[in-house]
Image (cartoon, helix red, strand yellow):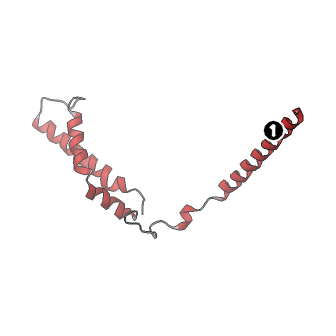
């Protein structure tokens, strides 16, 4: 299952509604082109139609995020990779060496 609720419930329907509104506009106004002056009302109407509270709730419910469904995403997706752990250890040891070198240089000046 893909974990993309906005794609399912917002973006895909927005494209469909916007395209249908553009086609209707062109049919009703055959001598007028869609320009930067009339694209905003078309997009705004599609935006308002798609972004309702019910649509957004259903999107997150379908993905298992709302209400919280702990079985929707397995715990192994939240574990740190071995590579990241080794990089963190290496970074910490490098920072410790730099700190020690700085302190030694600072103390040697006194």
> Residue 74 at what x, y percent from top left?
51, 67
Q: Secondary structure at mark 1?
A: helix
Query: Vertical placement of 48 versus 108: above or below?
Result: below
Q: Is residue 14 left or right of residue 104?
A: left
> Residue 89 at what x, y percent from top left?
72, 53
Query: Vertical placement of 74 versus 97: above or below?
Result: below
Number of numbered discs: 1
Query: Vertical placement of 34 versus 21: above or below?
Result: above
Which residue is at a point 24% across and 40% down the rendered structure image?
43
Depth check, front residue: 28 or 58 = 58
Which residue is at a point 68% across and 56% down the rendered structure image?
85
Residue that lies at the very extreme toward the front in this rendered image: 110
Q: Quadrant of the C terminus?
A: top right
Which residue is at a point 88% across and 32% down the rendered structure image?
109
Which residue is at a point 15% across and 38% down the rendered structure image?
25
Q: Quadrant of the N terminus?
A: bottom left
> Residue 45 at what x, y percent from top left?
20, 43
Query: Vertical placement of 1 versus 35: above or below?
Result: below
Q: Quadrant of residue 37?
A: top left
Residue that lies at the very extreme toward the bottom in this rendered image: 71
Crowd band around label 1 with a 10 angstrom C-alpha radius: few (<14), some (14–19), many (20+): few
Q: Is residue 54 left or right of residue 100?
A: left
Depth check, front residue: 110 or 105 = 110
Q: Quadrant of residue 36?
A: top left
Residue bearing the label numbered 1: 102
């Amino acid at each position: 299952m893909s974990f993309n609720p906005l794609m399912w419930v917002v973006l895909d329907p927005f494209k469909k509604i916007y395209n249908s509104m553009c086609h209707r506009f062109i049919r009703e106004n055959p001598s007028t082109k869609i320009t930067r002056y009339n694209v905003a009302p078309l997009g705004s109407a599609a935006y308002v139609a798609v972004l309702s509270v019910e649509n957004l709730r259903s999107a997150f419910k379908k993905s298992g995020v709302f209400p919280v469904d702990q079985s929707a995403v397995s715990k192994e997706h939240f574990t740190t990779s071995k590579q990241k752990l080794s990089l963190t250890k290496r970074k910490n040891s490098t920072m410790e060496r730099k700190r020690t070198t700085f302190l030694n240089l600072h103390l040697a000046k006194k």
